[in-house]
Image (tube, helix red, strand yellow):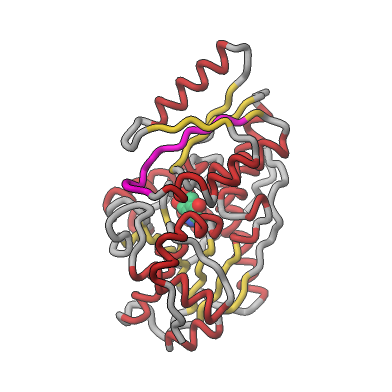
Amino acid sequence: MNLSKFPRVSLAHLPTPLEPMERLSAALGGPRIYIKRDDCTGLASGGNKTRKLEFLMADALGQGADTVITQGAVQSNHVRQTLAAAARMNLDCKVLLENRVPDAVETYKSSGNVLLDGIFGADIRYRDSGTDMDTAMEEVASSVTEAGGKPYIIPGGGSNRIGALGYVDCACELTDQTSNLGLSVTRIITATGSAGTQAGLVAGLTALNSTIETIGISVGADEKTQIAKVHSLASATAKHIGFEDGVAESKIRVRDQYIGDGYGIPTDGMLEAVQLCAQVEGILLDPVYAGKAMAGLIAMIRSGELSADDTIVFIHTGGSAALFAYDWFFNEHISKLK
Ligand SMILES: *Cc1c(COP(=O)(O)O)cnc(C)c1O
């Protein structure tokens, strides 16, 4: 597949490594597990948004923008990576943070990603939970225009058909790596939120005629809502790369059992997953996305839904900077698992 007609800037360290998790596989007595290290994309402590921003920033520059505007939850990894990308591209960046996690302690609002946002010199405005963030971004864009600037809005999570190209590219990169290693992967597991990661992967794998199934572990929305969101973006992305038929809805697999009480709220499964990966593999996950996705993977192995015959690729989408904002939770519950 050829993505070279799409404008792109270079921000990420690519290809990211694909590594076996031999000790985790052994500890769980389950399938062969590989981890795609998209936490190692390199920009400002890495993560999945960097791949999307390579295409989004190129689009912003192509439109002559001088300011990018984006939004996220308070501990948004997307906002942190966007601020870093904007610094690199010499663009102004204005961000809106939504107080999406109720009853958050003080460190949640000042540590982790928020601390890093400040170091990037972020112009941050806070909004209450439930605010229509797209409208709020439009308002900021109008004020930039009135002041003589040229704004470019990047949607939450960088998830539109332009940003999702980053994960079409990841699908190509991953299938190259697995064929070089002689692996026949049966399933990919990834966290899914704003949907661009899963949608881009599915669009890319469809275009490559791959039979690998991608399972998204939802971090907030119920299964039906998330499937609709991923499906709509996967189809738009497939069309954008020339696949007029789009993607069948039956190709979109989502699990919503691992969310717990809501977005960003810790679960026992996440606690176990974060500690297990740290203690048997030396890998830090994050509490909001990859930790819950790994909790889903572990549960699917224990229930027999994934068997020893499977070969799994887990996408590590990054976010470990947010661990610092959950110190109150980990400090209370940390244990040595083995
Ligand atoms: C944003 C994010 C995700 C979710 O990816 P989407 O493309 O928004 O679905 C997963 N993991 C981390 C660490 C993220 O920051």
Q: Is residue 6 visible?
A: no
Q: What is the quadrant of residue 329 in the picture?
A: bottom left
Look at 43% across and 57% down and name the residue there: 288
Q: Is residue 11 visible?
A: yes
Magenta run includes residue 85: no
Left or right relative to 200: residue 5: right
Residue 104 position, x and y percent, is 37, 48
Residue 160 position, x and y percent, is 49, 40
Residue 253 position, x and y percent, is 36, 60
Look at 30% across and 53% down and name the residue there: 262
Look at 31% across and 35% down and name the residue there: 130
Look at 43% across and 73% down and name the residue there: 334
Q: Nearer the viewer, residue 197 or 203?
A: 197
Instruction: Please say if 11 is above or below 88.
Output: below
Left or right relative to 266: residue 3: right
Instruction: Please say if 81 is above or below 95.
Output: below
Number of numbered discs visible in the structure rendering: 0
Q: Nearer the viewer, residue 155 or 331?
A: 331
Q: Nearer the viewer, residue 157 or 313?
A: 157
Residue 79 position, x and y percent, is 54, 42
The span shown in magenta is 93-104
